Amino acid sequence: MIASNGFMIIAIIAYMVMLIVIGFIYARRNAQVGDFYLGGRKLGAVVTAMSAEASDMSSWLLMGLPGVAYLSGFADAGWTAIGLAIGTYLNWLLVARRLRRYSQAAGNAITLPEFFSNRYRDEKKLLTWIAAIVILIFFIPYTAAGFAACGKLFNSVFGIDYTTAMLIGAVVVVSYTTIGGFLAASTTDLIQGIIMSVSLLGILIFGVLVAGGIDAVLGNAQTLPGYLSMTLSHNGASGQAESYGLITIISTMAWGLGYFGMPHILLRFMAIRDEKKLVFSRRIAVTWVVISLGVAVLIGIVGQTLSANGTIATLQGSSSETVLLRIAELISRQGVLCALAAGIFLSGVLAATMSTSDSQLLVASSGVTENLIGECFGIKLPAKKTMLIARATVILIAVIAAFIARNPESSIFLIVSFAWAGFGAAFGPVMLFALFWKRSNLYGAVAGMIAGGAMVFVWKYLVRPFGGAWNIYELLPAFLFACVAIVAVSLITKAPAREITEEFDSVTKMKNW
């Protein structure tokens, strides 16, 4: 066991070193802050696709989603996966090309808050202030969830102290992100996406074989009431099936709405070199997402079978999020080569964590340096000092996130779901109306951003606890409330200036490839 752990650690350390080396390789390409945060709009089609989706599918994909499937069966995890797959496709189809064009037409914006501000000619920087604050409020805990995943990985598999392990993961992410910036983060995301795919498929295949084959997995699942149903949910505590009605299904699928407001994903659309390659990027991205989500759900179901036959321990509560790690441990016991393979598979968890955390750190840092310091406070600094502050901000935000992640009992799924709702409701409606409704104005955008972000808190902590019909994922009501606010306030206030509508028309008339 000690020898197998050693080989796994060797594989993981090699992976971490590779990421830091990539950071140094791209360090010289950051001549200005626009390169650090957006890569000079030089991303290729494949890197854009894989970087967007790898930064999207955080540790939640390899730990949170299998954990949900393990505990409650197919319905909750399955409808979530379907909603995310649909959301991914629509985001690439509707938003990607238009945002790439519009962000360049609107003052060559390099951050999401800057795009909103330029789009609506926000001279008082109200949107910039609000957007930057929203980014900090939701991205810091989101990043903390990634750091927590690192801690859980090393603690569960190697017995390393949770806090120490979490800090090691944080240091590696911060290192290559602060050194290499957006291009390093995007390139590593491509590599991490590949490793995540290898990990998911390898662990699924091994898990099915150890469980006794597909028939054994299905046979065990069928003995659990509601476990394989799309209209029932399995309650692991009581062992009974519970209703999973239409409202719950719609609420769960609402996860897909979050894509329209995810800054770390939308930045990839803004950064692609050639918009004519977006169709190719979309095909790669959607295919990868559908396969990855499906495999993640199946891993949770296979894990339940392995627990039932005593191959792995029974997992309860947040410990269910370690089901993939438990299967990787089994692989490591099969010999030296298998231990190295298990190390690579476990690197997939780090890949999922780091590919999201690096993007989140860059977006949060840009919110401070570019939007708050540069735009709101009007402080203009030389390029070298701006780069220094940008890197220092990444480190500071990471320190705060690591402090939040210090609790080993925190649930990755719950943290991510709340942050996802926050971004989806605060930015998603504003983004869609900014891109597709010429009559929307600054006042409507401000109202929508505030209404969406605030309703996430109101619904989660004041309304949803009532249960029953009110037990709806907070993203859905908050998203709809923000849409109503944008439309209502835009219509009762002054129409946008001619300059704004002409710019909107010029983007609309651009040739589609």
Image (cartoon, rainbow, N blue to C red):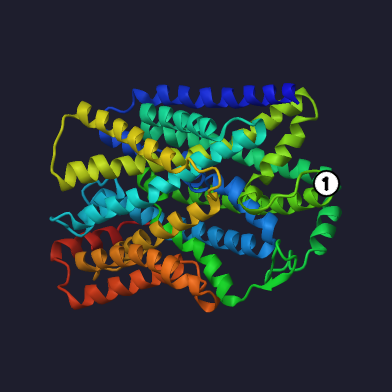
Percent position of residue 470, x then y:
49, 75
Q: Give above or below for 110 relative to 448.
A: above
Percent position of residue 316, x then y:
68, 52
- Callout 1 secondary element: loop
Q: Viewer-proximal residue, 339 or 102?
A: 339
Q: Is residue 458 left or right of residue 302?
A: left
Q: Give above or below for 335 relative to 444.
A: above
Q: Give above or below for 2 relative to 433.
A: above
Q: Is residue 503 left or right of residue 254?
A: left
Percent position of residue 267, x then y:
37, 46
At a point 59% along the width and 59% down the height, the residue shown is: 81
Percent position of residue 503, x then y:
21, 59
At a point 66% along the width and 34% down the height, the residue shown is: 157
Q: Viewer-proximal residue, 389 or 486?
A: 389
Q: In the rendered image, which quarter is residue 23 located in?
A: top left
At a point 44% along the width and 37% down the height, the residue shown is: 186
What residue would you read off at disc 1?
Answer: 310
At a point 85% along the width and 53% down the height, the residue shown is: 216
Q: Amino acid at mark 1?
A: Gly
Q: Let me know if residue 32 appears in the view.
A: no
Q: Residues within 10 Å of mark 1 (few under 14, many from 20)?
A: few
Q: Viewer-proximal residue, 499 or 227?
A: 227
Q: Viewer-proximal residue, 289 or 361?
A: 361
Q: Is residue 436 left or right of residue 353?
A: left
Q: Let me know if residue 27 appears in the view.
A: yes
Give the mark count. Answer: 1
Viewport quadrant of the N terminus: top right
